[in-house]
Image (cartoon, rainbow, N blue to C red):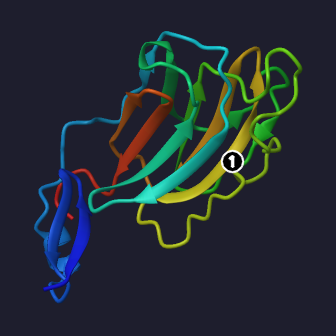
């Protein structure tokens, strides 16, 4: 019997190939209690950001900021809802689509601290390179605001002000935004 691997909020499950993955996803109990208040962790690294990527899950949409080589204890961040996203340093308004905007800051540059050469090929005010949000339930837009004095700033447009969480894993800052408030799909 062939197996299909289905990713759930709780892990990876093997199902027969003819099983309906949608049914498995619909029965997934979605986490609750994340809240929509600001989440911060004070720490910092000079290890630069190299990539930003996104993924869809049964209960939430996920953004991952890659900072390879940075240990978990050195990954600092500030993630909060803002009315408008303003670029650090210049104060320039960065327009971000969606019903609500999350300002995402990681305390890591997106440039080589020795040479100043970019390590992440993004341009201020433009969509994040390689990030296509077509088909996402919650994410609507993702913009690069800049990297200033060792912090990298992004704007994440979401459909509404929804609960979110921030996780740290060696080399990665992860932002999950729930599809809804109740925990039910």
Residue 27, horizontal then vertical, whole percent: 10, 68
- Asked if residue 83 lies left or right of residue 87, the reply is left
Query: Which of the two residues, 173 or 156, is positioned nearer the viewer here?
Result: 173
Furthest toward the front, the residue is 1
Q: Residues within 10 Å of mark 1 (few under 14, many from 20)?
A: many
Q: Quadrant of residue 2?
A: bottom left
**Is residue 158 among the parts visible in the rendering?**
no
Q: Is residue 2 left or right of residue 130?
A: left
Secondary structure at numbered mark 1: strand
* Residue depicted at x 64% and y 43%: 51
Viewport quadrant of the C terminus? bottom left
In the image: residue 76, left or right of residue 13? right
Identify whether 155 is placed above or below 9: above
At horizontal 83% and vertical 44% (from top left) the residue drawn is 123
Residue 106 seen by the camera: yes
Task: Report the residue that reaches farthest toward the bottom.
Answer: 18
- Percent across and percent down for residue 52 are 60, 45
Residue pointed to by mark 1: 143
Provide residue 127's location: percent of width, then percent of height: 72, 54
Instruction: In the rendered view, tell whether residue 116 sits above or below residue 172.
Output: above
Q: Check the image and report above or below for 70 versus 53.
A: above
Tally of marks: 1
Quadrant for the N terminus in the image: bottom left
Q: Position of residue 33 (x, y in %)?
A: 19, 37
Q: In which quarter of the image is residue 116?
A: top right
Picture residue at 84% right of the left edge, 14% below the top: 114
């Amino acid at each position: 019997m062939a197996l299909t691997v289905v990713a759930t909020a709780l892990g990876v499950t093997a199902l027969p190939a003819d099983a309906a993955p949608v049914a498995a996803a619909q029965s997934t109990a979605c986490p609750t209690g994340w809240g929509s208040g600001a989440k911060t962790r004070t720490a910092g690294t000079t290890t630069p950001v190299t990539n930003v990527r996104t993924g869809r899950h049964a209960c939430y949409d996920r953004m991952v900021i890659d900072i390879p080589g940075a240990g978990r204890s050195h990954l600092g961040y500030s993630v909060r809802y803002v009315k408008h996203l303003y670029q650090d340093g210049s104060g320039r308004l960065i327009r971000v689509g969606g019903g609500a905007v999350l300002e995402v800051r990681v305390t890591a540059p997106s440039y080589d601290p020795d040479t100043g050469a970019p390590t992440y090929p993004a341009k201020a005010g433009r969509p994040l390179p390689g990030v296509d949000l077509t088909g996402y339930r919650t994410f609507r837009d993702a913009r690069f605001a800049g990297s200033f004095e060792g912090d990298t700033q992004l704007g994440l447009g979401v459909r509404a002000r929804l609960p979110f969480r921030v996780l740290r894993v060696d080399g990665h800052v992860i932002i999950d935004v729930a599809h809804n408030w109740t925990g039910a799909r």
